[in-house]
């Protein structure tokens, strides 16, 4: 190449030194940051919308799905029960929220009872909640019935102060206080299924027998003890011919219908004679007797016999309650 041509040849192009003008808008830093922010906001909106939709769907499904709720009716009955197995305490009958526990063989006082017709469940109300007493499957707690062990009455000598109760249960409401170093007259002594002994005082209050009660002093009783009768342990069946008189072996409750869920209408004392006009089979292999006023008492169940037949000879010599003037 000639020297002349070398002088007119342009120098090599340096891209870094070239002035190409302003960058496109989509390549600007500000644009890229803006797109990123918009994307974040859109993702947040989508996530929130999906979560809200799921919540509404679940809420709708819960609204549409049938709720298994049951009504219960209060029976207005109070009694003491012996717990047959560990059980939960809940806020309300049929509730699933557990707030406490009771253990097997615990003795509990139920201030009230409630019955659920749909599940055939009987519930007992404690001071802090409810426990299941029985349902269509089995008994979870047994009512603590009383058996009279002494009916002549007498006096009890107290060594120290003692508490009396409205019912024969240490969990029942307190009725009053007795001072020590005194003698207290009583009408009868009862024993419950747990072996606890209770004195029925003349004013209707109950006193639990404890160590501080030194001895029992026999006293003349204004209450005449009925003559002993023979016990007939034969199984009673519905519809059979029965004697008209039965004698209570325990203090028993009178109910409006022949079942333990029926309303309580009264009480029959131990050794009291009642006229039974009809026998009827009940739940749990029980037999119920209809007394003269139309109400019912439990004659026996698979564990106990609560009434015994009166002796036929004694019945013939003794006027019945209907004919006695």
Image (cartoon, helix red, strand yellow):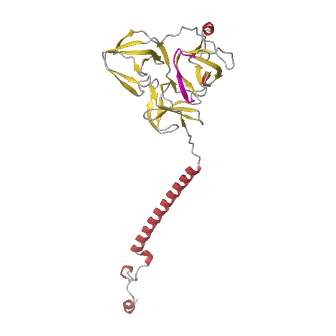
Asked if one can make out residue 35 in the rendered structure from this viewpoint, the answer is yes
Seen at 39% across and 26% down, the residue is 175
Quadrant for the C terminus, please.
top right
The quarter of the picture where residue 279 lies is top right
Q: Position of residue 242 (x, y in %)?
A: 66, 15
Q: Tell me if residue 99 is in the magenta stretch.
A: no
Q: Position of residue 90 (x, y in %)?
A: 47, 36
Q: Is residue 272 magenta?
A: yes
Residue 137 image point, x, y percent = 58, 29
Residue projecting furthest to the front: 325
Residue at 63% x, 12% y is 234
Query: Could you say which is closer to the camera, residue 217 or residue 138?
Result: 217
Q: Quadrant of the N terminus?
A: bottom left
Residue 301 visible in the picture: no
State left or right for residue 183 relative to residue 323. left
Which of the 4 quarters of the picture holds residue 28?
bottom left
Who is closer to the viewer here, 274 or 42?
274
Along the viewing direction, whichever of 316 and 44 lies nearer the viewer: 316
Q: Residue at x 51, y 30 (%)?
A: 77
Residue at position x 46%, y 16% in the image: 191
Residue 115 lies in quadrant: top right
- Is 60 placed above or below 6 here? above
Nearest the eye: 152 or 70: 152
Which region of the structure is painted magenta?
Answer: 261-273
Q: Where is residue 16? Give x, y as percent.
A: 37, 79
Classify 14 as above or below 259: below
């Amino acid at each position: 190449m000639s020297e002349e041509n070398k002088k007119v040849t342009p120098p090599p192009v340096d891209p870094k030194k070239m002035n190409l003008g302003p960058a496109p808008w989509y390549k600007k830093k500000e644009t890229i940051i803006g797109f990123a922010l918009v994307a974040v906001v859109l993702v947040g909106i989508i996530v929130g919308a999906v979560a809200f939709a799921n919540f509404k769907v679940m809420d709708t499904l819960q609204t549409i799905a049938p709720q298994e709720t049951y009504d219960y009716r209060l029976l207005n009955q109070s009694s003491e029960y012996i717990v047959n197995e560990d059980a939960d305490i809940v806020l309300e009958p049929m509730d699933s929220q557990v707030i406490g526990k009771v253990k097997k063989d615990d003795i509990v006082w139920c201030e009230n009872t409630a019955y659920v017709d749909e599940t055939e469940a009987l519930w007992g109300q404690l001071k802090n909640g409810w426990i299941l007493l029985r349902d269509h499957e089995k008994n979870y707690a047994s009512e603590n019935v009383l058996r009279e062990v002494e009916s002549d009455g007498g006096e009890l000598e107290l060594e120290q102060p003692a508490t009396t109760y409205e019912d024969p249960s240490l969990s029942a409401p307190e009725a009053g206080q007795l001072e020590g170093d005194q003698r207290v007259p009583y009408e009868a002594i009862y024993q419950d299924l747990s072996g606890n002994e209770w004195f029925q005082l003349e004013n209707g209050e109950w006193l639990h027998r404890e160590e501080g009660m030194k001895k029992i002093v026999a006293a003349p009783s204004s209450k005449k003890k009925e003559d002993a009768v023979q016990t007939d342990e034969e199984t009673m069946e519905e519809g059979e011919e029965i004697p008209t008189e039965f004698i209570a072996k325990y203090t028993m409750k009178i109910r409006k219908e022949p079942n333990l869920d029926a309303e309580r209408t009264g009480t029959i004392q131990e050794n009291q004679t009642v006229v039974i006009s009809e026998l009827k089979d009940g739940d749990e292999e029980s037999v119920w007797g209809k007394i003269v006023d139309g109400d019912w008492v439990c004659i026996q169940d698979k564990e106990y016999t609560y009434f015994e037949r009166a002796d036929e000879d004694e019945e013939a010599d003794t006027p019945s309650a209907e004919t006695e003037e």
